[in-house]
Amino acid sequence: MQHAIIQRIVRGFGANLYGQGVVLIIQLAGVPILLHYWGVELYGEWLILFAIPAYLSITDLGFSQSAANDMTARVGRGDTAGALVVFQSLAVLVYCAGSIGLIVFTAIIFSIPLNKWMLFSQLPIDDVRWILWLLGAEVLVRLSDGINFAGFRSQGEYGFHLSIFFSTLLLQNLALWLVAANAGKPWLAAAIFLLIRILVSISVTALLLRRHTALKLGLQHANVHTLGILLRPALANLAMPLSMTVNLQGMILMIGALLGPTAVVTFSTLRTLTRMAAQMIISVSNAVEPEFARAWGLGNQLLLRQLFVRGLGYSIWLAIAAAILLLTLGDWIVAIWTSGHVTMDRALFGWLLSSAVASVLWCIALGLLKGGNLHLRASLWFLIASASGVALAAVFVQLTGRLADAGIALLLTDALMAVYLLKAASAHLAIAEAQLLLDAIDPRLLFRSFIFWNHNVHR
């Protein structure tokens, strides 16, 4: 592989590692801080409210991701004029969708009878409404970051933009902790969360346009036809965040409804810990995905195959290492992390960790399809699997009353995704699924890849 490709992947992976470090800090520090200052009941109610506005992330209809891949492929083959058309078309769509979404969301939040649906013991209903609105507005403002994401990524600066994104996330959570530590109410924390997002979004847009003068905001090159071309992959991207929201937040809402806020805290804490293994996998997949897009744009199947096998191999070995570490230190981490407020549920922990490790078999394959905007069927499959997983978990929990049984449903979801996506990847790469796995887990190939990448990065 070319030296420039390796450098971009390493920078992207480094930014992802930085991001995982930020997420780790947020998770390790946030849980005990908020438990200490807000208590289990109030923290559980905050988690439930924080989960609901996440569904607004689908307001851009999935076009940001598809536009980013399309722009990256165009720039890769030298079509900068076409990339500008996509950029301006995306910007018009996102700004319009975000504005309309905010109006509709406001009308809903301040008109529906929340007092009949959310019987919280710590938060008054007026605070619930304002917290939901502020967090919802933050999600809608964050949509503009999809425009910046497409711009930076197409110019080979995926890692740079990702570093800004996670730094913003860290700043928002630091502000949240400061509010809680100074006896601030959750509505104030939500307000500051939104204010930081607004300031950063404006600043990053200005930075993008200054660094890359070929990209300009405006209406001159925007057109509906371009959006129509991107519609199919956009629908796929619409299904992806919805699927993730159902998979992550849907499970929390279901557990909150059936077992209460305390069970939500236990489940959320253990799932956060076990997903450390999955996050390592996602770091590899996200770093390689822009290069998948460039390889699709060039029609280079050999490069696609090399990227996939090496990415899958690194993911598998990282997942195994992370799983061994968590199995060894899990009890100790939970005890120290939560100061004894959360009791380790070994059965739940085991199922959640198995689910996280199983996801290694499909994350890279999904990245391969996303890079070529060919993931509509995979996204629909993930949506169906996620919804089915939550429904199955609800049945298990209601029948047995055991929180741990929700983890079984999550493992089944990842198993279904692995079977489907490995088959899809093997078809596109013209290699049998078994051979892909054998090549990926071959330690000799992994070692040669490491030496090759290390040599080129330091050349």
Image (cartoon, rainbow, N blue to C red):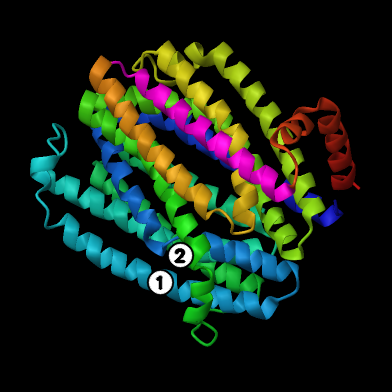
Inspect the magenta stretch and tell me whether residue 393 lies in it: no
Q: Which one is in front, 287 or 187?
A: 287
Magenta stretch in the rendered image: 402-429
Residue at 65% across / 22% down in the picture?
A: 320
Residue at 63% across / 27% down in the picture?
A: 319
Q: Which mark is residue 95?
A: 1
Q: Which one is in front, 428 or 215?
A: 428
Q: Position of residue 458 (x, y in %)?
A: 88, 45
Q: Position of residue 166 (x, y in %)?
A: 53, 47
Pointer 2 or 1: first along the chain: 1
Cβ–Cβ below 8 Å for labels 2 and 1? yes
Q: SS at mark 2?
A: loop
Q: Residues within 10 Å of mark 2 (few under 14, many from 20)?
A: many
* Side of 373 relative to 333 (left or right): right
Residue at 27% across / 32% down in the picture?
A: 254
Which three-letter amino acid code belongs to the residue tagged 1?
Tyr
Residue at 48% across / 12% down in the picture?
A: 331
User: Residue 308 is drawn in which quadrant?
Assistant: top right
Which three-letter amino acid code belongs to the residue tagged 2?
Ser
Q: Which mark is residue 49?
A: none
Q: Which one is in front, 215 or 448?
A: 448
Inspect the magenta stretch and tell me whether residue 407 lies in it: yes
Q: Residues within 10 Å of mark 1 (few under 14, many from 20)?
A: some
Can residue 14 be seen by looking at this rendering? no
Q: Is residue 104 above or below residue 313?
A: below
Q: Is residue 297 above or below residue 131?
A: below
Q: Is residue 297 above or below residue 263?
A: below
Task: Return the residue at label 2.
Answer: 144
Q: Position of residue 233 (x, y in %)?
A: 52, 61
